[in-house]
Amino acid sequence: MAELASGIAEKILEKLGSLAYGEFSLVLNIKSELTELEGTVTTIKAVLLDAEEKQPYNRALSIWLRHLKDIFYDAEDVLDEVECEVLRKQVLRTYGRTSREVCSFFSCCSALAFRSQLGHKIKDIRERLGKIAADKDQFNLIPRLEDGHVMQRRRAMTHSFVPPSDVIGRNDDKNNIIDLLMGPDADRNVNVIPIVGIGGLGKTTIAKLVYDDKRIVEHFELRMWVCVSEDFDVATLIREILKSASGTIDEKLGVDLWQTSLRNCLENKKFLLVLDDVWNEDRNKWIELKGLLSGGSEGSRIVVTTRNHLVASIVRTGFTYTLECLSHDDCLSLFVKWAFKEGEDKQYPNLLEIGKEIVKKCKGVPLAIRTLGSLLFSKLEEGEWKFVRDNEIWKLEQKEGDILPALKLSYDQMPSHLKQCFAFCSLFPKDFLFNSDFLIQFWMAHGLLNKMPNNIQNLEFEDVGDMYIKELWSRSFFQDLKNELWDYRYWFKMHDLVHDLALKVAEEECSVVDFHTQNIARTIRHLSFSHNALQVPNYFYALSTGVRTTLFPAKLQVLSLLEQPMSALVEACISRFKYLRMLDLSNSPFELLSSSIGNLKHLRYLNLAWNYNIKKLPDSICKLYNLQTLLLHGCWMLERLPKDTRKMISLRYLTVTTTYTCLFENGVCCLNSLQFLRISDCMRLEVLFQGMDGCLTKLRTLVVSHCKMLTSLTYDTKHLPALETLVIDNCEKLSLTGGEDDRDLKLSLRKLKITYLPKLEVLPQWLQGSANTLQLLSIEGCDNFMALPEWLPSLKSLHTLEIINCSKLSSLPAGMNCLTALRELTIEYCDELIRKCKEEDRSKIAHIPTVRLVD
């Protein structure tokens, strides 16, 4: 991850620019030190993009970047200490017991010692950075801006011919694309068809097959092929298109005459243009080019190959063709073709069996199969084949065109903040099912969500993280994205080969280890344990104290006999790794969490979920003023939250299971940073939010599930002005209605899902407060739900209504045609209601585009 130094530098500059440091720099008398530090970091950052591009070819430069990054990390830790003191001071001001405590904060001996120590640390960082900044001059680095930072992704131009015999399993794809190209299109002269897929799937290969097919040659008067590559320069593309069309071009003519020549060349001709390997996300550039290509006759086509779904959405005029992975049988045939001489596979059935396992690892990506097949060609020893089968692809010798370089080309195109986010995914196993909530919290714990995409302002970290995930997905680094309509999360995976790339780029800092690991690089700062321990591993003491992440595998932590070794390991982590940002102890068996957890003042993420034994959290946990995520769901024996939970003023994401009758007792908790709250399996919980008036002003998502004694939300929905998603599930004594009239309440709910509430008879009046915002409403398994309210048609933004298994609901209210935004109505297992919708109430739903009635 040497190439990620620019991302760390950016974070440091953001911290230095924070207004909070302005106050503390004066109090601590370190203003000049901070100013000089900022200047030095700014000078170095200017050349980092150039250094990161050149470092793969210059070992000395790579070492320089590694040393620089270590200093950057130390600088970030020091600045975080200032941030910790800012938060501590804020807590003292708000919750301090005496005014003397607040006034003496900077006058006591400990505060004076902190002042002196911090000043020395900042001075040391500045001096180290000054020295390494001077060393940069030997590399002749050029200042560059990220917007102009384009890695060289492909050295060889693609061409438009490929022998059909070299391609296996793509005949259907070829014919489908040919049908699209030759099909009628009366609406426009030039139709644009993108072919999208991850690197290595064969987009260019398919385009070549189509381009040279006899049907296409006969159908189009003019065919042109241009490899666009990374620089979408319109003038250059005009020249290359002309060159492809006529074979030669007069370089002296210039852009204006080239444009004229291009129009003349295309005029009244049915042409096919293939733009291969497009990365351009600037719609204006595309519109400019497309305007020059509009002179062809009806039926002209442009094919664009790209790895980026965003590019496809910009260029397409209709259908996008997504190229899928090859079937297993086709993969095996392709592998045999490249790994054996003709007929040789039958002579070596043992190698073929190993080859089948190698093919499975390739997950249907033909470029990976061809690469590994070529590597094994003419090698007939089982050991060599097993070596390939049992080792990661990135450990093999790589050549231009192999699968990892192909994927890394996509990686090199990403901005630094996305590179950092992607690299951290290497800590999780292959086929790991990510969910959006978890990954966003993970990235947030490491300060990776500070950069606002496209200069959008006033976004929450969670919104930025959501944008990052979707951008990585659009670039094909994530796949199989599943977004259930009513889920507040969505799920996705990484292709194995993409995971291998993440391992490669993160190998200096992220490591998946077991307890038999002998050697581990001191540069490692993020650890994921693949096995559990019977003792603290020896390499713990060789690691830097700057380790920031420790993850333990949930599936290996459920045995009670591991309680003592797990406790020892946790204690070792807490005592040694004082700069931890993320500590995942989910499914751990211990009963007591060490009180020394309060010393981890940098901690942002703590996962104690599914700990069946823990009964009490230490009071010291409330000293974690930086903590943003605390996961306590599935802690069946947990009695209550600590009384000073309110002091965790940075907490944004909280999940809780408790045995207590009241979650937040007597208003002791005022979590004004909280964005997400999930309360589940609290079997004795009776009241929610008692005494919490005005204390959850930023809460956006609330999930309450399986709380069988819960009778009331205390109508504190009025004190949740930011609430957008509300999910209430399996609370058998909760009705949601009461004596208060909240019709004038102004809420901002967008999603409401109510499931299995036997006490629910009607929708609560307070829901009318969301008349202008509610978009999705689902009611399921509510046996006594009698009727939809007469005011339902006032929900002007409602676009999805779902009613499932509500047997007593027999009719829809009048005025359904007033729900003009309603696009989907689903009614399942409501016999009488479905009958009426099919007969008497048919007119009420006639205007809805999609209606599903399931008996």
Image (cartoon, rainbow, N blue to C red):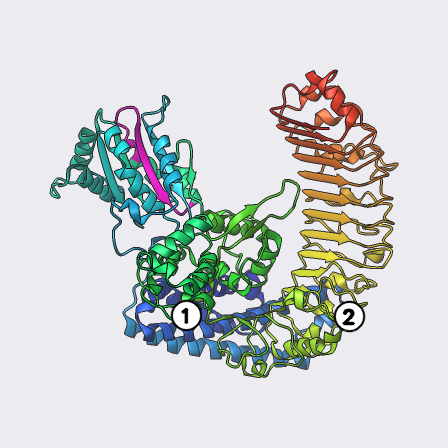
- The reply to whether residue 202 is visible in this rendering is yes
Q: Eyeballing the image, is 35 above or below 709?
A: below
Secondary structure type for disc 1: helix
- The reply to whether the magenta stretch includes residue 293 is yes
Secondary structure type for disc 2: helix
Q: Quadrant of the N terminus?
A: bottom left
Compared across the picture, whether 137 is left or right of 778 comes to: left
Residue 630 lies in what quarter of the image?
Answer: bottom right
- Residue mark closest to the camera, 2 vs 1: 1
The residue under label 1 is which amino acid type?
Glu
Residue 772 lies in what quarter of the image?
Answer: top right
Name the residue nearer the viewer: 683 or 766: 683
Q: Quadrant of the C terminus?
A: top right
Q: Residue at x 62, y 81 (%)?
A: 113
Q: Give the image location of residue 489, x and y in percent.
A: 62, 48
According to the picture, the residue beneath numbered tag 1 turns out to be: 382
Name the residue nearer the viewer: 227 or 39: 227
Distance in Å between CA atoms under marks 2 and 1: 59 Å
Compared across the picture, whether 696 is left or right of 29 comes to: right
Compared across the picture, whether 313 is left or right of 450 comes to: left
Q: Eyeballing the image, is 196 above or below 838?
A: below
Q: Give the image location of residue 749, x and y in percent.
A: 69, 39
Q: Residue at x 28, y 74 (%)?
A: 138
Q: Residues in magenta?
A: 290-308
The residue under label 2 is which amino acid type?
Asp
Residue 382 lies in what quarter of the image?
Answer: bottom left
* Badge 2 density bin: few <14, some 14–19, many ≥20, Cα 10 Å: some
According to the picture, the residue beneath numbered tag 2 turns out to be: 619
Determine the residue located farthest toward the front in the rendered image: 347
**Badge 2 or badge 1: first in the primary sequence:** 1
